Amino acid sequence: TAVPTTTAPSTTAVPTTTAPSTTAAPTTTAPSTTAAPTTTGAPEELAAVCSFDNVQHYLTCEASGGRGGSFTWSSDAPGLGTTTGSTYSGQLEWGLVIDRIEVELEECLSSDCSTVTSISEFSLQPRGECPSDFANWFPSFLIDDLNLLQEVEPPARIVGEVQEPPGVFRRPPWQNDLQVRLPIDATLVGGFKMLTYSNLEDRNPEHVPEVQYGLLFETTCEGLWFKVEHLLELAPGLIPYLEGVPISETTQDHEVGPVSMSEGDLLATRIGFALDGNAAFGFGIHDDFRRVPTAQHPQQNNAACYYDFFAADTAEFLREKTVQRWPVHVGVCP
């Protein structure tokens, strides 16, 4: 018996659905950019750039270059000191006369330091109230009556091996009482107390010392200063200013004041040495700018000829009274 043939039922195929065509957004490629190469060059060389105002006496410096370290400044000019930072500046103190400044700039990165130097050369212009001519510039003399003087010794003397900048105004022996006054407005800035002796005509054979006072004054014209020495008794008003000055066996100046004083102010009431009657006091004018002839030995401190700083008749009187016991520097006093 034949096996009956079974026909599988017909299968209806699932219709195929085609998704609508989608247009893809075009891909935009950014143009290729070539990056600039990073160049690491050597650091700019370290330098100290300085300028100097010779009228105001003012120094200005700025650091240039370097490696980004810390800066320290110093110089050989008194008073400018040491500072840090990228700049350095300062004004020279009154009366300081120099013609060059050497500045040192140090840069440090940790312990790695390098140093550069800058040198400024200049010609200073004096500050203050300076005359075109110093003749007759001091309005008065140091004592009221010139006739009290017996003799005068010139400045810039050479006494043996000792340089003696001041001259001498001398009275007769034992006439130590004398009022010494300021000959021009000035500022007391220094002084000394010297323990020494005089043995005039062997009147002090045991060489007993006495204290001698010296006063240093600055005028209103920079670089022009003067000293009054061998004062035995100071004016009462000046004694407190010299209380802290030590007694020395040399004429070592110490800072005093400053004390502004006027022409005619009393400086001392006694002069010279009481034990042997040596009645004399010293006086010297100095010009650090050398506007008048000065003695050039370092220990003379630019001692000038003082005669013509006073009135013409005073200068003539002083010259007539001048005696020259010791050599003097040539060219200082005409």
Image (tube, grey):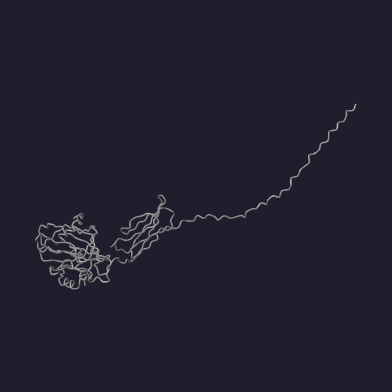
What is the tally of numbered marks visible in this picture?
Answer: 0
At which x and y percent is residue 44? 45, 58
Q: Is residue 97 shown left or right of residue 34?
A: left
| Quadrant where the N terminus is found in the figure | top right
- Of residue 136 and residue 303, the one placed in the foreground of this image is 136
Query: Splitting the image into 4 quarters, where does residue 79 fall?
Result: bottom left
- Of residue 234 and residue 124, the one placed in the foreground of this image is 234
At which x and y percent is residue 170? 14, 66
Check the image and name the residue furthest to the top: 1
At which x and y percent is residue 48? 40, 59
At which x and y percent is residue 162? 19, 63
| Quadrant where the C terminus is found in the figure | bottom left
- Of residue 257 and residue 171, the one placed in the foreground of this image is 257
Query: Splitting the image into 4 quarters, where does residue 58 fall?
Result: bottom left
Q: Is residue 144 above or below residue 18?
A: below
Check the image and name the residue furthest to the right: 1
- Of residue 36 and residue 241, the one placed in the foreground of this image is 241
Query: Splitting the image into 4 quarters, where does residue 280 fall?
Result: bottom left
